[in-house]
Image (cartoon, rainbow, N blue to C red):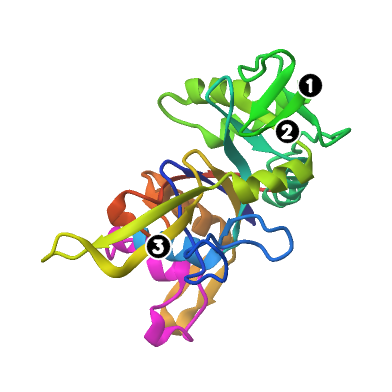
Amino acid sequence: MARLLFVHAMTPLHVGTGHAVGAVDLPLAREKTTGFPYVPGSSLKGVLREVARLKGNGFPRQKLFGPERDNASDHAGALLVSDAQLLLLPVRSLVGTFAWVTSPFLLRRLARDAREAGVGEVPMLDMNGVEQAKVAKEQAIVTADRVVFEDLDFKAETDNKVKTLAEWLGKYLFTGPGASDWQAMLLKRLCVIHDDAFAFFSLHGTEIVTRIAIDPDKKTVKKGALWTEENLPTETVMVSLVEGQSIAAPEHKVEINAEEALDQLKALLEHPVQIGGDATTGRGRCRLALAGGPR
């Protein structure tokens, strides 16, 4: 039994590898084959475990995530959390401020997980060329039949499937007060581009910020304390697959079924959580949303 877990970045998000061999000192963690940024499932699971800890001893934290490290061999946790893969990347637009950009490859990966989570078929689109961009008729990002993102421009083409896709994503991504406004915004700003063009933005459309540390006595930059850091921009959307499994370990008084475990997970998603580094500087604040049901 599985659910989709959407991760919506409300501030810049940095989940890195802790080292670098290139120009950026602290780059994002990236997939080896695609080069796309991702959030490791271990990081997501650790965040959820910490939120569960804050719920207090009455919450079945160890049932969901397993015992603490000293007793880790007692039994497994009931929740399996996969890596959060990139789905929608916000890119600066000449008109409309920004667009949520995705590609056919990302949609096919989403469709594969969506079938596992029982949320129906994801609307699919095919691109005829790398210079093409598909938008909904209700779009707000086209000027003179072109969409202009950063330094690149694409020939805009309206496609009803983009509207269907925006409506499909919107109902899962945005819920609660103000959801209709966000859903309308997604419809106007969603854009599907060729996989090759998206790969360019995944490499060059992230935020690179320069950080320093101040010597508290001299009030100047500490020697050697100047570094660059890569962040996913605010409004990035990623998606993970969370699976529930039934566990029964009577000797440790542990018993929970898969459906109950996933229902308990919902209680952890009521408020935004902090993912990745730089919490004290306001980065990593994310909203999580669960989607799916019995197959």
Identify residue for label 2. Answer: 192
**N-terminal-most mark, 1 or 2:** 1
Is 201 colored magenta in this rendering? no
Is 55 colored magenta in this rendering? yes
Task: Evaluate if marks 1 and 2 touch, with contact meaning CB atoms under 8 Å apart.
Answer: yes
In percent of width and height, residue 51 lies at: 35, 58
- Check the image and report above or below for 131 versus 251: above
- The outermost residue toward the left is 217
**N-terminal-most mark, 2 or 3:** 2
Residue type indicated by callout 3:
Trp
- Check the image and report above or below for 276 versus 176: below
**153 or 112, which lies in front?**
153
Residue that appears at 15% across and 59% down:
219
Instruction: Give the number of the mark in front: 2 or 3.
Output: 3
Q: Give the range drawn in magenta.
A: 52-80
Task: Evaluate if marks 2 and 3 touch, with contact meaning CB atoms under 8 Å apart.
Answer: no
Residue type indicated by callout 1:
Asp
Tell me how far mark 1 sits from mark 3, CA to CA. 44 Å
Which disc, if any, is residue 37? Answer: none
- Check the image and report above or below for 253 versus 16: below
Which disc, if any, is residue 227? Answer: 3
Tell me how far mark 1 sits from mark 2, CA to CA. 10 Å
Q: Is mark 2 on a helix, strand or loop?
A: strand
Residue type indicated by callout 2:
Val
Residue that appears at 61% across and 47% down:
204
Identify residue for label 1. Answer: 159
